[in-house]
Image (cartoon, rainbow, N blue to C red):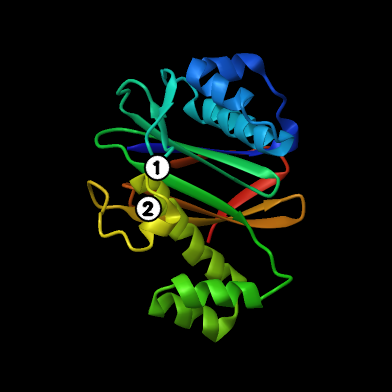
């Protein structure tokens, strides 16, 4: 199974109508219904990143399930997931047997530690808490949090439900973390997929964005 991940700056993306139309009428109407300009730009950037990540892969219209998780209308042997935070949007695409993928990216905020400690106390496992409490390293917080988000998106359930969810993906899954540097900001990106290791993951980035294993 091969994975492609595209990371784009929101401001570098124009509202390309042909890109939006590529993913079908339902997705086009969903975007037209978004009145908030920032939210619309995030969605358009996500679709643009998805198109770049797909490369030469064949694809069709996007539909969404009852939980809002997007997928291709036909079984193309491809799964994808989209996330955005701060000034970045990311799309991850995988193809192969039993494809299943989730991705999350979070802007690292270091100004206030107490809100992160409260979230950790409420939602983290004991081992995750211990690692964060011992070091107060915010990267440990974001690694744990993005892993939870990416797993929830892989499963196709909301985060709140996923935190107590007993259901597991249809096959073994693995998480890989990356540090993304962009315009002086740090981001933590987590990929949750059936890929064990990083050798089959191809990153597509802009010139001012770098990605390294974390």
Q: Is residue 95 above or below residue 163?
A: above
User: Along the line of sight, which residue is nearer the eye, 42 or 192?
Assistant: 42
**Residue at point 55%, 26% (across, down):** 30
Q: Secondary structure at mark 2?
A: loop
User: Along the line of sight, which residue is nearer the eye, 60 or 187?
Assistant: 60
**Residue at point 50%, 24% (across, down):** 55
Q: Can residue 39 be seen at all in this image of the molecule?
A: yes
Q: Is residue 99 above or below residue 169?
A: above
Residue 155 rendering spot, x and y as whole percentages: 34, 47
Task: Report if the CB atoms under discs 2 and 1 are less than 8 Å apart.
Answer: yes
Residue 200, label in figure: 1
The residue to which callout 2 is attached is: 197
Residue 151 rendering spot, x and y as whole percentages: 39, 53
**Residue at point 47%, 79% (across, down):** 129
Q: Is residue 138 above or below residue 84?
A: below
Q: Secondary structure at mark 1?
A: loop
Q: Is residue 115 above or below residue 90?
A: below
Quarter of the image for residue 84 reads top right
Residue 42 rendering spot, x and y as whole percentages: 64, 37
For the residues labelled 2 and 1, the Cα–Cα distance comes to 7 Å
**Residue at point 31%, 47% (across, down):** 194
């Amino acid at each position: 199974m091969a994975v492609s991940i595209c990371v784009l700056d929101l401001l570098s993306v124009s509202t390309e109508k042909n890109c939006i139309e590529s993913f079908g009428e339902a997705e086009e109407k969903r975007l037209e219904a978004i009145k908030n300009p920032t939210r619309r730009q995030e969605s358009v950037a996500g679709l643009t990143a998805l198109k770049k990540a797909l490369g030469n892969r064949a694809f069709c219209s996007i539909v969404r399930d009852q939980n809002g998780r997007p997928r291709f209308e036909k079984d193309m042997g491809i799964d994808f997931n989209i996330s955005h935070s701060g000034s970045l949007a990311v799309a991850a695409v995988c193809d192969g047997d039993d494809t299943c993928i989730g991705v999350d990216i979070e802007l690292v905020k270091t100004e206030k530690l107490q809100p992160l400690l409260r979230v950790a106390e409420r939602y983290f496992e004991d081992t995750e808490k211990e690692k964060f409490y011992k070091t107060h390293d915010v990267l440990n917080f974001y690694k744990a949090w993005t892993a939870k988000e990416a797993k929830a998106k892989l499963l196709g359930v909301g985060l709140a439900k996923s935190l107590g969810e007993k259901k597991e993906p249809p096959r073994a899954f693995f998480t890989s973390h990356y540090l993304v540097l962009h315009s002086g900001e740090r981001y933590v990106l987590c990929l949750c997929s059936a890929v064990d290791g990083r050798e089959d993951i191809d990153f597509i980035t802009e010139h001012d964005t770098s990605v390294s294993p974390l």
